[in-house]
Each structure stands twice: as C-alpha cells, then as structure tokens.
Amino acid sequence: MTRPYAVPLTEIRREHVVVNSRFISTLAPAFSIDEARAFIARVKKEFADATHNVPAYIIGGGNTVTEYFSDDGEPAGTAGKPALTVLRGSGLGDLVLVITRYFGGTLLGTGGLVKAYTESAQLVVNAVGRGRRVPVHLALLAIPYNLLERLRLLTTRHHGEVLAEDFAADITMTLQFPVSDFDAFQLGLRELSAGKLQAEVIETREKIIKA
C-alpha cells in the first residue's frame, strides 16, 4: 500500500539571477505523465526564446513513483539531475518542474551550474503550499425548506461543503464530503429527518486539501 504523501497545492514561479544568467523556476501539481508533459510543453512554449528549459517530474509518491529529468542541452548531470534530487528530497509527489535559463554571457562551470539549478529548484519547493489528496463523495439531497439551516450546520459539522442549492418545490443540495466523514453525516441526516432523508452519492473523486 502506498503511504500518504504531500502534493503541491498550486502552480508557482520564482526567479533569481546568477552571474547575469536568469533562472525562472515554474512548479505545478501533475497527476499523470501526460499532465506533466503538457505542462513542460506549455512552459517551453512560453519561454521559447530561452537558452534552456530544464524539466523534471515525479508522478506518484511514497513507494510508487515515476521520475524523469532532462538537461536540455546543459552539460550532462548539471541541470535536470540536481533539480530532480531536490524534488526527491522535498517529500512531495505528483509534481513537475521546469527551470528556464537565459544565458547571461558568463560560463558558470560545472559546479556553478549544479549550484544554480539546485537553488532554483529549492526556491519553488520551499515556497509552494502543500496539500494532500483526499477521496470525496459528491452527493445530492432534496430537503424541505424548514430544514435548510439545520442541514447547512450538519454539513459543516461533518467537514462537508455545500456546492449548490437549487430552490424549487423542495431544495436540492449538492454536497461534498470526505469519504471518511460521509457515513456520520448520513446518520445525522437520518436523526434530523426521523429516517426520511438520505443523500445519494453521484460521484467519488479526489480533492486536494491544504495539509
């Protein structure tokens, strides 16, 4: 069984300059190799005039991962590998990174490149918000008007979220709950409605929540 692991909450970007070379680091969550490749292609297109666009990614996490890096024209082992090493040490999974370099006219040397790419990766890894993937149920529930406020409170009490409310003869609520809290919500709902109401699960998916 794969142990739980953190994932990036959002896409972020950081920039710094090393001996006139400009390094732009862009990091994002990615949950498949296709997502990671699409992100890399997008960043490369955005910075098509850059000297190098160095990619690295880790898909999965814990004990089950797929890793990739490329030096994108930099001397072997000086760019993509240091970036991937930082990703490995971050404790994050399901993430993709592209470090864009605009050459500043001064050669950094092998050691200088490793240091610059390591620092560039660390900038975004240290700054990104961390979340975790949680399975959630999407559920529908039709209720009479007199129960609306109590249903809202019950939903909040069980770590749920009201996504939509449709007001007609009854109120149809679209709700989202962590799977682990849903049974307790259903029990509270039965108690509140004297056994008359039950939410219907229409979809189960994963959501990233702040760690």
Image: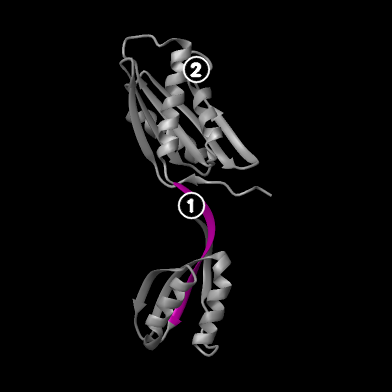
Name the quadrant containing residue 27: top left
Q: Residue at x 32, y 10 (%)?
A: 105
State the residue in front, 160 or 51: 160
Looking at the image, which residue sits at the far bottom?
194
39 to 147, vertically: above or below: above
What amino acid does circle 2 point to?
Answer: Thr
Look at the image and give the residue range highlighted in magenta: 130-142
96 to 71, vertically: above or below: below
Would you say residue 39 is visible in this rendering? no
Q: Secondary structure at mark 2?
A: loop
Instruction: Report the disc number at residue 78.
Output: 2
Image position, residue 5 (x, y; %): 57, 46
* Mark in the foreground, 1 or 2: 1
By secondary structure, the bulk of the magenta-drawn segment is best described as: strand
What amino acid does circle 1 point to?
Answer: Ala
202 to 1, vertically: above or below: below
Image position, residue 25 (x, y; %): 39, 30
Image position of 4 (left or right of 10): right
Q: Residue at x 49, y 27 (%)?
A: 83
Q: Secondary structure at mark 1?
A: loop
Q: Residue at x 55, y 77 (%)?
A: 186
Q: Do labels 1 and 2 touch, CB within 8 Å? A: no
Image position, residue 137 (x, y; %): 52, 65
The residue wearing badge 1 is 211
Q: Residue at x 34, y 82 (%)?
A: 168
Q: CA distance from mark 1 to mark 2?
A: 32 Å
Question: Label 2: few (<14), some or many (≥20) within 10 Å?
Answer: many
State the residue in front, 49 or 153: 153
